[in-house]
Image (spheres, helix red, strand yellow):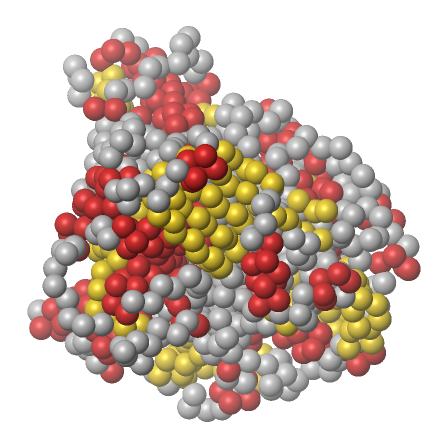
Amino acid sequence: MDEQIDIGRRRFIVATVAAGGGLALGFGSLRATAAAFNDPVAVGSEFSPWLVIGSDDTVTVRVASPESGNGVATQMAMYVAEELPCDWTKIRTEYASTHRDVVEDWVYSKPIPENRFFAGRSTTKERMNSMLQVGASARERLRLAAAQQWNVPVAEVEARDSQLIHRPSGRSLGFGAVADRAARVKLEKEPALKPEAEWTLLGKKTPAKLHIPAIVNGRAQYGIDVRLPDMVYAALMQCPVHGGRLKHYDADKARAMPGVRAVVVIDPDEPRPQQKLRNPDMDWDNSAQAGIAVIADHYWQARKALETIEAEWDERAGAQWKSDAHIVRSASALVEQPGKTVTTIGSPDQAMAQQTQFVEALYSTPYCDHAQMEPLNGTAMVTSDRVDLWHPTSMADVAHYVTALEAGVPLEKVYVHQTLVGGQFGRRNFGDDVRMVVAVARKYPGRPVHVIWSREESMRQGRYRSLNVVKLKAGLDEHGMPQALIGRTAGHNFRPRNIRDEQLGMYSTGFGLFFSAYAEGAIPNSRIEYHDMPLHIMTGPYRGPGYNSNTFILESFIDECAHAANIDPLEYRLKIYANWPDPGPTLCLKEAASKAGWGRKLKAGMAQGIAVGNWGSFGKPQAGTTVCAVATAEVSKKGQLKVHAIDLAFDCGRILNRDAVLHELQGGVVFGLNMSLNEGLTLKDGRIVEGNFDAYPMLRMADMPQINIHFGGLSGHERFSEIGEPPVGVIGPAIGNAIFRATGKRIRSTPFRKQDLSWT
Amino acid sequence: MWVVAATPGNTRVDVGAGVRRGMSVKLDINGQLLETDAAPDTPLLWVLRDHLGMTGTKFGCGIAQCGACTVHINGGATRSCQIPLAAVASDGVKITTIEGLSPDGSHPLQKVWAEANVPQCGYCQSGMLMAAAALLKEKPDPTDADIDVYVSNICRCGTYPRVKAAIHKAAAMMKETQHG
């Protein structure tokens, strides 16, 4: 199919390739040349840019958010099907095109002006309502078309199970039979959405993710599975000290190796044409890193050749950090001094002076890598006419922009082909991986270049969870309750995401230091301060950014306060939240504690710990998702830790797909377990040490505790908040607090596997 | 346009000198004899993915840690990233990949996987399924401990509880079919 089609004709075009699945969410093969460059490919009549109905009754829903395992595509389809009563087996999804968004006056991103529209989650109210409306509108147009065809009043036509039924006569037509006519119907007025009480699918049914059949056959197509005519492969190495530059390299041996076509250098300082583009909120750094790539006929050839290249790097300022301990030592000194203020509630200094008992502690958490199972990769083809990118990005609009910027072409000449995403957890947001793929491909124009990071390269060139050092001080009143809290952090910059400091040539990050209920009024007086450090390690969002380590720190510290006050940790938290204008924390604390059998007698060395937190609310009540975990853990005298069970309660308001929620929460618990028990990158001479799963271990089947997810904490508040990130924060502190009660040892750093837990 | 107008000094594209091909060999994969000219030391994983275009077998770590590349070699689950082509390019070596686990996705594990919504991102699941299939062949009625030992694959999404439940369910299904 020719790409230069008149877009106005789109709805009448029958795709010539890949019928019966095709590129839908990257399920099919990209081997056919025409198919590779043209998406989407739904066959049928286009009702709106979001919806196509085929003559075979197939309903194709276009999805802007990449599917990375969170079920977002299936959720979007559920919204449409709630209002468009169709046979669920006839529902398909495919990715919306960023190119179409650009050339058709922001047809996808303008109606719902959310930042990073081609990304993220499915449950915001705007997105839900817009997709419900897409379904409702199509239903009414189908009814009208059928009524016209039968020449009967539309009120007599019912839509049900992909059928239009004329009730008086019993005649029926499939959606597909009138789709073409219906797609041309213009409604005088958009139909009203049905009341939530009449929903039959949302909150009622729990369909499995639509793309699972392709996964279990091995046919699902991730970024790394893209295969194109004349494609060549590239292996990549970047400066091991982030922010450094290439000084010298010797690639003579590599060039002579079998299959090798080229050795190319990526130079961040090479001038790139400046372009002013409509900005999709790219307030982070995704500049190119200094690197070398070998391009060959096959990946293994490229990889072997790359390993022979000797490179000398100008390591720049990052080399000053001799180890991670070096950073923690410096940060620990800084947090003893007053820093810049982030937030103040009440009069913390005055309140602190009035208290009788004080608790002080120093905490630290390390850099963590996302370790998503699909290593970073991507494919790009740069020609004089257009630039194509096939990529497992988690933000296709950002990928589109980065491609345009790196290739120096206008947005209209960029085509992003979104694939399935083999795990992201925040790693594929920035487009830094897109940048490197395009940077390599534009040095080898005219052929699709498939760039694959080795696991080691993927892990050592991460955009990590930031290292965090925090000093906390609480003042407790005569009842032992906290009246004042002062927190100081040092490390990566307190600014959103990854902003590059041009002057230092370094990278800094931070994300909402505390944003917890404690710092937003649950403790009446508080102040949070920070110190910037000139750190070069590149950081980024990692499942539950900021929250994931701050919850460990705060919830362990609150446990210290409870201990100092000689009050049961559950009771202590219930007291803190007693007047909080949101029932969620109390509901979740009670639900998790009662289901876990809180307070029951356990054998020596075994204990329970509890923690509560909220992701997404920034400390405000009736928002985000509140979670509470109880960990039941055992520590041997030698210090071996075994987590027996995690009981988790949550309040995201309401839920739309119970099984999907359960699945995400289970996964979030496992992620939180691994983060707290296992994960921590170390640094040597400015370089990340760990490169693979032997040094950066992952929990496996045999390591799993009993994971119990409880639904009794749901408050029924009208929101549908997200559930992927919330569990991650509370697992670590629940376990740490159990360790304290089992051994008397307070653990103020993760991962637990590196702590001495032995006791007598 | 800037991209293609880049000067040679700017692009530093150097065309490689040697293209020495390995000897062509035949592999028995999913019951078919497939020919490849990959070098003998190329890991089976990359022979499958790059040379033969069978991308169901995934690259995860390259050091036999994660199991995403698990295939069957003569029925036994094997991490293909550590098996050089030369080791399997001989008569009597039968390789099965996820594409050949069943002709049509009808293996009980595949069916249960879909019904029970097991995968999240799905990237590790080919390897999980191949490890589980080898287990059920050896131990049709596995205990939890058997599953822990045989399915040591890494899943970052944390599907472990569902994988375990699904293996038990598939085992029960297979037993029923046998007896029924």
Spot occupied by residue A171 in the image (x, y as percentages of width and height): 21, 22
Front residue of this view, candidates B171 and A557: A557
Position of residue A402 relative to residue B90, above or below, is above
Quadrant of the image containing the N terminus of chain A:
top right
Left or right, A104 with respect to A595, comes to right
Tell me the residue at 67%/65% (across/down): A321
Q: Is residue A461 left or right of residue A315?
A: left
Vertical side of A198 occupied by B82: above or below: below
Which picture quadrant has residue B127?
Answer: bottom left
Tell me the residue at 42%/40% (across/down): A352
Can you see residue A627?
Answer: no
Q: Looking at the image, which is closer to me, A678 or B49?
A: A678
Q: Quadrant of residue A217?
A: bottom left
Q: Nearer the viewer, residue A288 or B167?
A: A288
Q: Which residue lies at the image location 73% right of the left edge and 58% below the top edge?
A: A243
- Identity of the residue drawn at 55% across and 80% down: B43
Along the viewing direction, whichever of A455 and A567 lies nearer the viewer: A567
Residue A758 image offset from top left, x and y in percent: 33, 77
Residue A326: quarter of image:
bottom right
Q: Quadrant of the C terminus of chain A?
A: bottom left
Figure disc tally: 0
Q: In the image, is A152 to the left or to the right of A61?
A: left
Q: Residue furthest left?
A: B180
> Does residue A194 appear in this view?
yes
Q: Where is residue B121 drawn, in percent x and y? A: 42, 55
Name the spot of residue B10 as percent of width and height, x first: 88, 57
Above or below: residue A186 compared with residue A199: above
User: Taking B135 as reference, is A383 left or right?
Assistant: right
